[in-house]
């Protein structure tokens, strides 16, 4: 109701804050994710789901929680997380760059 009152006059749509059923668990999960990324460790989707179950088992709430793809998509949206697919492009740099450049110029 507060969002409706605080919205601009004439606005047709009101955006509500995304909510979670387990906000404390998600905050802890997000903090751990940020720590791992700062250390340069790659984090995949399965890590989020496994760690979420571990955090909820510590509080005995895991019986109601299902680590569904819908929950995970909502979690990523709430915390603005985007998981990228790893690629192999541009990872192998030529060892002798001068020789590569010379051979390229000879072909021109």
Image: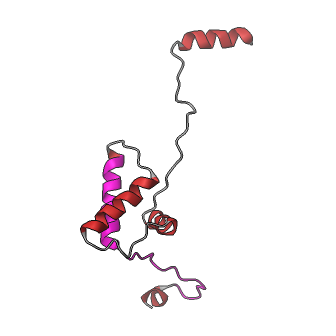
Q: Work out which quarter of the rendered image holds the N terminus and state it.
A: bottom left
Residue 63: horizontal and vertical position, in percent? 35, 74
In the figure, is residue 102 to the left or right of 91? Answer: right
- Name the quadrant containing residue 101: top right
In the figure, is residue 59 to the left or right of 68? Answer: left
How are the colours assigned in the image? Answer: secondary structure
In the figure, is residue 64 to the left or right of 87? Answer: left
Q: 88 and 53: which one is in front?
A: 53
In the figure, is residue 88 to the left or right of 52? Answer: right
Which residue does the image show at 48% across and 80% down from the upper left?
A: 16
Which residue does the image show at 27% across and 72% down from the upper left?
A: 60
Residue 83: horizontal and vertical position, in percent? 49, 52
User: Residue 27 colored magenta?
Assistant: yes
Residue 50: horizontal and vertical position, in percent? 37, 58
Residue 24: horizontal and vertical position, in percent? 30, 71
Residue furthest toward the front?
63
Which residue does the image show at 63% across and 9% down from the upper left?
A: 102
Which residue does the image show at 44% across and 67% down from the upper left?
A: 78
How many numbered circles are shown? 0
Q: 102 and 91: which one is in front?
A: 91
Q: Is residue 57 above or below residue 43?
A: below
Q: Is residue 48 above or below residue 1?
A: above
Residue furthest toward the left?
58
Magenta segment: 8-37
Q: 78 and 63: which one is in front?
A: 63
């Amino acid at each position: 109701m507060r969002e409706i009152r605080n919205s601009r006059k004439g606005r047709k749509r009101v955006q509500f804050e995304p909510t979670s059923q387990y906000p404390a668990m998600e905050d802890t999960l997000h903090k751990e994710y940020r720590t791992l990324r700062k250390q340069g460790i790659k984090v995949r989707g399965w890590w989020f789901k496994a760690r979420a179950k571990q955090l909820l088992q510590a509080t005995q709430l895991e019986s109601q929680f299902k680590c569904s793809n819908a929950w995970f998509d909502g979690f990523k949206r709430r915390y603005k997380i985007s998981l990228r697919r790893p690629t192999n492009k541009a990872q192998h740099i030529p060892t002798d760059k001068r020789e590569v450049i010379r051979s390229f110029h000879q072909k021109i």
